[in-house]
Every structure is written in C-alpha cells, then in structure tokens.
Image (cartoon, grey):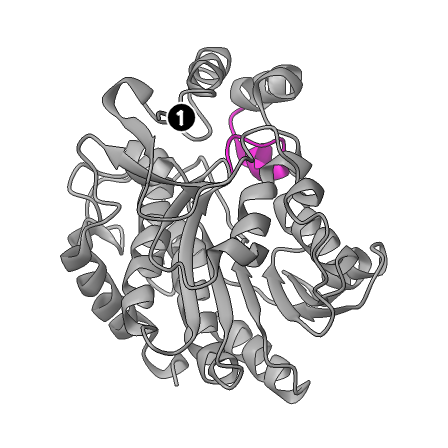
Amino acid sequence: MEINRRQLIYSAATLAAGASLTACSDSEYTVSIDTRWPTSSFGADSTGEEVTAGLDLAGKVAVVTGCNSGLGYETMRVLALRGAHVIGTGRTLEKATAACASVSGKTTPLALELSDFQSTVDCAESIAALELAPNILVLNAGINTFGELELVNGIEKIFTVNFLGHFILTNRLLPLMQTKNNGRIVHVSSRSGYGQAPAVGIDFDNLRGEKSFDAGQAYGRSKLANALFSLELAQRLQGTGLSSNAIHPGLVQTNIARTAPVLMRSAFEWFGGVIAKSPAQGAATQLYVATSPQLEGVSGAYFEDCNPVVISGQNHMTDSAMAKKLWATAQSMCGQYLI
C-alpha cells in the first residue's frame, strides 16, 4: 500500500512558490506502509480531535514545545481537552502564558528559547521543580529561516534550534520520565529529512558553516537529525518502558513561512487553503503517535498521515551508524549543558 495522496499538493506548492516549504521531489521516493507496526484507519484528512476521540488522558503529564502557535498550539489544545496536564513552552513566558490561558483544561506555561542552551536547561529544571514527571514529550518547535547563514554559539542556527535544543531538553527530562516507566517521545521531523537534506545526510564537516550554506538543505539536515535522534534514542530506551518515534505532519498552514521570500510567502498565503493541511489536520499524526493505545511499545518508527511508513529511494532516515555518530557529535556540541 503506497501513500501518494499529497504528492500533487507538494508539487503544486513548489510551482506556486518557486521553492517548496518542505522541498521534496516525490518522484525519487516511494512512501509505503510499514507493516512491522500497527496501522490505523486515519489518514491525511484526519484531525487531532478525531484521532484522540474517546481517550481519557486524566493523570497524564505532557510537554509540548512551541505551544503558542500552529501545530504546537493545536497539540496542546487537544491534549488538554482529553484531560492531560500540558506544560506548554514558548520562546517567551508571555507567549506561552497567553497560549495556555486560551485553551480549556489544565496547562502550565514555561519559557523555552531553543537557541539558548541555558534556557533549555532552565526549562527542564523548572519542570522538575513542578514535580511533574512527563508521560508525553512532543518535540514540536522549529524554525526555517529561508535566509543567509546564521550562527548561534558558532553552530548553524536551524540545526541548533530544531535539533540541539531538543537534544538537551530530552536528555535533561529523561531521568524524570523514566520514573514513570511508561512514556512517549515524539519528534517532529519532515519529508525534508529525506527529500531536502544534503546528499551525504548529516554533513558533519559543515555544522558550523565551514562550507557553503543553503537554507533548504539546512532545514532538511535539521529534520533528518530529528529522525536520527529518534532512531538512536529508541535504541537507548529499550527495556525502559519509554518509546521514541518520529513523524512528518505534512504541509500545514502555519507561520513557519513568515521569514520566507515574498513570492513564496505570498503564494503560500494565497494557495495554502487549497494545497495544505489545516493545523487540526497537521497535528493529527503527532497526537496519534503520542496517545494511541495501539502504539503501546512501538518505538523507532517513522509516521506520515497517522501511519508508520518506510521510504524507498536514496535517503538516510534509518541510517543507524549515522544516528550514533550524530548522538556523539551532539554530546560534544552541547557539552556542559547535558547532565
């Protein structure tokens, strides 16, 4: 069974914008259901409320990064609606507070600036101080700068925010999560991880901008890093009761294109309602993976449109050797900020 439903959408987005927000040449890849794992009847048009219908998450604690807009906001809203206590993070406490106050249910706002490693440490320590051990961690926040090379502490910014900040946060929260002996970590990756990353995968000799910079490849690299992080983490979590899975939400109407060139941004604004998922649909896959009872024990998988999939064609999404090297590299880059 192949998932081809949105291939035309991605092509249309590319033509309309002159460049794709998720840049992926579908003709090079085949996305097929991964029959090693349980499958669902949900798909591209399913919403977060639909995939969580009937669930009672009372007593569960969830952490959602980037809660103040887009997918993060919808993920927080639905988890709180189903009874979970959601710790929602935003780049500032003001943004997180406003977002948390606007949804029904139990929420706690915290500041998390992923480009600032100390902020990530402070956020993890604040969660520990609340004495709330998370059952669910949704690593949702991310950026796509569409511009020139930017460095944060000498490291390329998109890689720093989308991957390294979450690497620190996760490692800091793991001891707390392991006290529950049951939990799920969901990494928001992307088709860009296999359709837009550098041909070599993670170009370890270019993470500090040593060589040429391409914003599209930088975004793809960061999303490949998310998938590889999930893969290696799943290996390390075996026997702990915790799982780690990566997902692609789809092309979604969010504000991630706010820094895109005018032509691309305008095209997405004009045609977004036709070619893209709504936030309610875009959040469905991460909500499904974070909560579905039938995924109990599933770890190390990659999901698109609420189903586990495998990618054929040249890609590095399941490169375990690269995942191990990435982990070691991240440890070196994050240094003192890790436990």
- Helix or strand or loop: what does disc 1 sit on? loop
Query: From the viewer's perspective, is residue 262 above or below residue 303?
Result: above
As rendered, which of 251 and 154 lies closer to the eye? 251
The region drawn magenta spans 249-261
Q: Of residues 254 and 5, which is closer to you in this image?
A: 5
Residue 260 included in the magenta stretch of the image: yes
User: Which residue is at a point 40% across and 80% down the rendered structure image?
Assistant: 337
Q: Is residue 32 magenta?
A: no
Q: Is residue 81 left or right of residue 173?
A: right
Q: Quadrant of the C terminus?
A: bottom left
Along the viewing direction, whichever of 215 and 11 lies nearer the viewer: 11
Q: Is residue 115 visible?
A: no
Please identify the quadrant where the N terminus is shown: top left
Residue 321 placement (x, y as % from top left)? 14, 58
Q: Is residue 105 left or right of residue 313?
A: right
Quadrant in the picture for residue 303? top left
Q: Which residue is mark 1?
A: 3
Specify the quadrant of the image occupied by residue 211.
top left
Question: Which quadrant of the structure image shows residue 171?
Answer: bottom left
- Residue 95: where, in percent of width, then height? 74, 58
Q: Is residue 41 above or below residue 321?
A: above
The reply to whether residue 99 is in sight is yes
Q: Residue at x 60, y 28 (%)?
A: 45
Q: Give how far across and how far down residue 26 sits, in percent.
A: 32, 21
At label 1, counting other C-alpha atoms closer than 10 Å, the crowd grade (few under 14, some 14-19, many 20 or more) is some
Locate residue 37, reporting x and y percent: 37, 48
Q: Is residue 222 left or right of residue 46?
A: left
Give the side of residue 19 with respect to residue 35, left or right. Answer: right
- Front one among 8 and 180: 180
